[in-house]
Image (spheres, grey):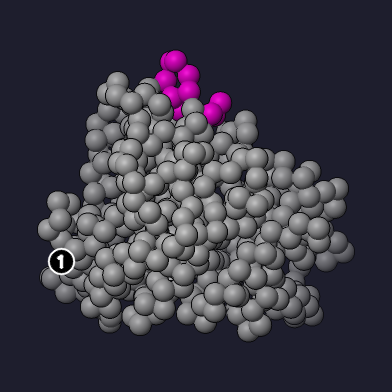
Amino acid sequence: MNPSYKDLLQSSIDKADGQIKETMKKMQNVPSAFWIDIKSKIRKGNGHPDLSTVEGILEDAAKCDPPHLVVFIVYDLPNRDCWALASNGEICCHYGKDVGRTKCKMGSNGFYEEGATQCEDGLKEYRETYIDPFAEVVKSYDGKVPIVLILEPDSLPNMITNMKDSRPTEFRGCHDETKRAYMEGIKYAVDKFAESDAVMYLDAGHGGWLGWANKEDDQTGKFAELIGSMNIASKIRGFATNVANYQPIGKTVCPEPGTCRGYLGDGHPCCEDDPCGLRDAWNWGHNELNYIDVLDARMRQAIPGFEPKFVIDTGRNGNPSARTDCGNWCNPRDNGIGHVPMTKTPDARIDALYWLKTPGESDGCTEILPDGGKCARFDAMCESSDSIGGRASEPRAPEAGLWFDYQIQQLAANADLGDAWWVDLYQSGLQCRGTDGGCAPPLPTMPPTPEPTLPPGKCEGNRSEEHTSELQSLTSSR
């Protein structure tokens, strides 16, 4: 559980009432990821509270008996987030004038300028001042704290759809130099963290981004080939999907990938949960369960022997039909908190549902900030038709990563926290130690999953040994 997040939630609980207040109280003990988006958050004593640094967080987690698992988001590549202005980072391929959102040199299009050095200096800075100290701290907790790392959201998916050659009339800064920075930077990070016990997942976008796997436009396949070319599959556990996004999970795996594209699959239960109407555009991954199914297939095809596992971000997908345009990603209104983290997932390939994006933190600022100042990292997407702050009746949105009380109130109002057993577990509070100072009591046993009910027939659901054996055979082959 993120202690600083608990405090931020309390500040909004104090202003809320009714069901919104009760929902936020249920959220206070729910675990979420820690975003390490600047170098100063690695070690203690750099101007951040200890519990906002890698070193301090792990030190705190190690005091628990048994130690609690910690999830970090590794997020500080050179020329970070080349497609969006709201979350540009601190490490640059080329430094220029400080424009507030970044000190990187910007081109005529307002995005990162491409130079001739192929980001040599930026990569060196990333390796030596971010990844190396980060990995050193993580390594020092081998055998003491279980650690999960989610690597560089949005980076590699941008290499498939948002490069200058694929969007020549909408060029927003993803160029060849940035591509090298991302691919070599992430490969270095994977190799370095692989020297520790940490478990790694790479960001893989979401179905509404890379879910097209048709022969004439196989974005999922291209992403798998990109991963294969980096020679890192043996060192990662798999992929994180839907990070900071709003796609539904889905309930039922299809008989095969692509069952629901276009007019295919009408009436099949696995073709439900498509609030963005992606099927009509011949998308294979209209929900994350179907996206993971095709992503898994493409990865196995591109990288023989690779059997990836997955984590789905459910921090804000509790009301996935809220947006009028599913391309609007910045602080969309009327969305809801999604399923609380759990390991009881709809598919064995999915390790967990988890709150990777911290619910309540802004995606980016409106052109005018809440204090009346001008936003230095303004991206027009943060005043889209769906974005909070895009209407005169709404408050302005703060900078990316800052607490947005108006947004968390909406997210709580539209929440679907999911499985009551897990919600109650977190609300009861997970103990760090026992009352005697020793081991904390073990987690209660999860209720068993109900066995599938036989459809109506001449047996009327009665289970003879023959029927039970047949059902077990079918389940095993599935």
Q: Is residue 388 magenta?
A: yes
Is residue 140 depicted above or below 89 in this figure? below
Q: What amino acid is at disc 1?
A: Thr
Residue pictured at 69% horizontal, 65% vertical: 221
Q: Nearer the viewer, residue 307 or 118?
A: 118
Q: Give the residue drawn at x 72%, y 45%.
A: 278
Residue stretch in magenta: 384-394
Quarter the N terminus occupies: bottom left
Extreme residue in the top direction: 392
Percent coordinates x, y for residue 28 in the rendering = 30, 47
Q: Quadrant of residue 433?
A: bottom left
Label 1: which residue? 435
| Residue displayed at 29% across by 24% down | 373
Residue 300 position (above or below residue 151): below
The image shows residue 43, relative to residue 470, as above or below, that is above
Q: Is residue 223 magenta?
A: no
